[in-house]
Image (spheres, rainbow, N blue to C red):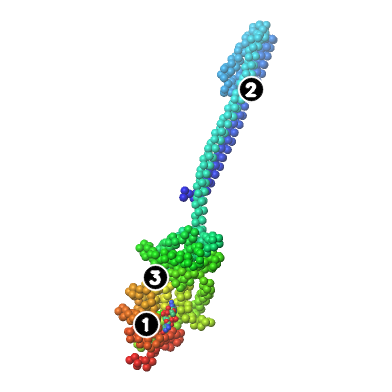
């Protein structure tokens, strides 16, 4: 039944109707043929009957004439009348023959025989009369003609003819009745046949219609399912969710309960998809959906709206406790291990909550506000729950404005490279520069990257920004004397693009910048999100002579693991350690161990954030060889940076003598 399609049903219906038409035409044809036959038979029967009757009258007439001729012969004795008689006689015999031939089939043999017999008897008597006439015994001849025997014979002959006519009439009536009966039988048979035929068609049509009704019902249900449910997880979709939320609002109005809309998003789902493939991505979503469904009650609803966005709507007494509890529980549940084909996929979620009627009276608006809260949670504290606050909306508008503005700024080259020298800590000699982005804003002046880099990352503008900046920086620095290295910062969002190495090398080639003078700075955290792609990119760069620095070292996770796995050339000690190394024993210890690590791995270590002579001396004493910081130079525009080239930075002659 499941395979019975609506198309099949209509096809059968069409076939059945066609068959019914053919059947109808057949029956109609049969009836017509029967009628034609009946008509033909009527005419045949009537024709032969009228022929017999006609002949009988002719015989009767000839009989009269012959009787008259016999009478005249007896009365006059003239042989002329005998001649007349003899002239009539063959015709009479022939007419009788013809009658016998045309008699209806059901005329008894006796009737036929009697007619011939009577004819013969008559002729016998007439011949006796003629014999007497020839013998001139006219009196005897007349006596015989007038005798009762002679008259009886003539009468019998006439009666016989009359009887014959009667019998013909009867036989015609019979025949017609037979034809009628046969025709009725034929019609009746046809009727029965047609009834049977139509009954069969009706049954089949009915059965198929039943099937097609079921098929329609299944199709309808499927459409309904498609219209209201997400095919991957089987969870309700947006439309269905909104309907349910409306129902919950009606119930809430009666019971005085609030409604919480929890928007939930899988953290870094894109990375899961990229790293393990869409198949694993889909399974993670299905499993997440299953876990979410398992933690909502019958009267609550959990839906899937976008790729990795789920929404749960629950009723609650107050606006904070219950939604917070439910959201946390679901986040915990999703965070439980996901083991897919032996791969342990790390899945985490973040949630944003909006409350009805506090935040809005409209389902769409509630969903949007839950989303806004979610976006805020993702930006600030992943794995946490945030409730919507009106200020978030204002921020959002500000961000939207900023995004348009930043996009335009990138296009118009307002993002300019500043160059901060990286120097030999012992001498202050410039080894290279780190390129740091600045937004040269037409009205707000120079804006620091902390104000727009993370935003550029979140809004997907970081790649355009990096390449625009890189091209500008490379063009400036290409011809600088002493061939200083140029380092650029690559963000986490870019290290998931497997084509990144090719794009960077392409940019170098475009401005003819040698790869051995080029460095990329990546943070440990950036590597952690998709280590396979990151590795692929970094090896691709390394193989062409580009050097790789591990930025902000010591602040991320699992530092040693990355050092062992990746083609790192330099380690940059994060500024937070240098800043606190004088006050905090721990920072000094960390710096020392990083320097020791670099030495044992044969990797140079760069100390960031050297602000004072004291910093420089301390680090030098700890064995650090390279440094970067305001003490030597802040990040500078290209022209100023270029002017630094050719002379050592930072130390005065006094410093040097003091150090020596
Ligand atoms: P970062 O890569 O750690 O860059 C070093 C930051 O420390 C720079 O801040 C620099 O100006 C600052 N700095 C250097 N020496 C000193 C010092 O002695 N004292 C103090 N207090 N600060 C010092 P900046 O330029 O504001 O950049 C901040 C962060 O923005 C960078 O940290 C980097 O993570 C990011 N960034 C800057 N430009 C880009 C870029 O083009 N792409 C990417 N992805 N990130 C960038
Ligand atoms: Ca850096
Ligand atoms: Ca750094």
Q: Is residue 617 above or below residue 411?
A: below
> Image height check: is 415 above or below 652?
above
* Mark 2, residue position: 53
For label 1, the residue is: 584
**Real-space Cα distance between discs 2 and 1?**
149 Å
Callout 2 touching callout 3 (CB < 8 Å): no
Identify which residue, 259 or 126, lies in the foreground.
259
Question: Which element type, helix, strand or loop, lies under badge 1?
Answer: loop
| N-term mark: 2 or 1 | 2
Q: Does residue 497 appear in this view?
A: yes
**Which label's residue is closer to the chain start, 1 or 3?**
3
Within the image, what quadrant is residue 254 found in?
A: bottom right
Name the spot of residue 380 as percent of width and height, x first. 46, 73
For marks 1 and 3, give the one nearer the viewer. Answer: 1
| Mark 2 to mark 3 CA distance (whole Å) | 118 Å
In front of the other: label 2 or label 3? 3
Q: Position of residue 595 (x, y in %)?
A: 33, 81
- Residue assigned mark 3: 530
Q: Does label 2 or label 3 sit earlier along the sequence?
A: 2
**What distance separates the C-alpha of mark 1 from that of mark 3?**
34 Å
């Amino acid at each position: 039944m499941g395979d019975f399609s609506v198309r099949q049903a209509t096809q059968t219906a069409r076939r059945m109707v066609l068959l019914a038409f053919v059947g109808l035409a057949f029956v109609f044809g049969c009836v017509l043929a029967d009628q034609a036959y009946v008509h033909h038979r009527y005419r045949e029967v009537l024709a032969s009957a009228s022929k017999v009757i006609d002949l009988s009258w002719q015989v009767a007439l000839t009989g009269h004439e012959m009787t008259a001729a016999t009478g005249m012969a007896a009365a006059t004795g003239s042989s002329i009348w005998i001649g007349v008689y003899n002239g009539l006689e063959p015709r009479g015999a022939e007419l009788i023959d013809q009658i016998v031939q045309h008699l209806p089939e059901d005329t008894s043999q006796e009737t036929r025989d009697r007619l011939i017999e009577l004819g013969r008897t008559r002729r016998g008597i007439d011949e006796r009369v003629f014999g007497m006439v020839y013998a001139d015994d006219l009196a005897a001849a007349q006596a015989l003609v007038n005798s009762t025997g002679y008259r009886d014979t003539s009468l019998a002959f006439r009666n016989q003819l009359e009887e014959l006519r009667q019998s013909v009439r009867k036989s015609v009536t019979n025949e017609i009745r037979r034809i009628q009966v046969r025709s009725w039988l034929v019609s009746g048979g046809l009727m029965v046949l047609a009834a049977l035929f139509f009954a069969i068609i009706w049954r089949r049509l009915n059965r198929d219609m039943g099937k097609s009704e079921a098929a329609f019902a299944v199709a309808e249900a499927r459409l309904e399912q498609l219209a209201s449910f997400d095919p991957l997880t089987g969870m309700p979709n947006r439309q269905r969710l909104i309907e349910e939320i409306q129902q919950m609002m009606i119930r809430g109005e009666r019971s005085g309960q609030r409604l919480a809309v929890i928007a939930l998003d899988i953290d870094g789902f894109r990375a899961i998809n990229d790293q393990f493939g869409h198949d694993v991505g889909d399974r993670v979503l299905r499993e997440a959906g299953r876990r979410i469904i398992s933690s909502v009650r019958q009267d609550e609803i959990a839906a899937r709206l976008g790729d990795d966005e789920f929404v749960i709507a629950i009723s609650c007494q107050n606006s904070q406790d219950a939604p917070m509890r439910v959201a946390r529980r679901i986040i915990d549940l999703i965070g439980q291990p996901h083991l897919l084909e032996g791969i342990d996929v790390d899945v985490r979620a973040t949630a944003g909550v909006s409350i009805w009627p506090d935040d809005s009276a409209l389902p769409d608006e509630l969903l949007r506000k839950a989303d806004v809260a979610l976006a805020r949670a993702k930006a600030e504290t992943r794995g946490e729950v945030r409730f919507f606050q009106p200020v978030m909306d204002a921020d959002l508008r500000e961000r939207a404005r900023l995004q348009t503005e930043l996009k335009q700024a990138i296009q118009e080259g307002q993002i300019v490279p500043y160059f901060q020298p990286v120097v030999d800590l012992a001498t202050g000699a410039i080894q290279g520069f780190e390129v740091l982005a600045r937004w040269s804003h037409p009205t707000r002046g120079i804006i620091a990257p902390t104000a727009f880099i993370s935003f550029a990352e979140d809004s997907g503008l970081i790649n355009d920004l990096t390449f625009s900046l890189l091209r500008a920086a490379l063009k400036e620095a290409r011809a600088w004397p002493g061939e200083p290295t140029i380092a650029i910062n690559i963000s986490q969002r870019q290290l998931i693009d497997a084509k990144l190495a090719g794009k960077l090398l392409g940019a170098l080639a475009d401005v003819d910048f040698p790869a051995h003078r080029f460095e990329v700075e990546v943070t440990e955290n950036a590597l952690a999100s998709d280590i396979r792609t990151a590795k692929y990119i970094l090896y691709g760069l390394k193989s062409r002579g580009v050097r790789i620095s591990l930025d902000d070292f010591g602040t991320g996770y699992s530092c040693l693991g990355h050092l062992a796995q990746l083609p790192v050339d330099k380690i940059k000690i994060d500024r937070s350690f240098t800043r606190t190394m004088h006050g905090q024993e721990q920072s000094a210890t960390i710096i020392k161990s990083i320097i020791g690590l670099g030495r044992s791995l044969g990797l140079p270590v760069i100390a960031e954030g050297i602000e004072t002579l004291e910093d420089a001396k301390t680090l030098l004493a700890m064995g650090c060889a390279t440094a970067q910081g305001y003490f030597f130079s802040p990040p500078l525009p290209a022209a100023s940076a270029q002017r630094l080239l050719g002379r050592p930075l930072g130390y005065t002659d006094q410093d040097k003598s003091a150090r020596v």
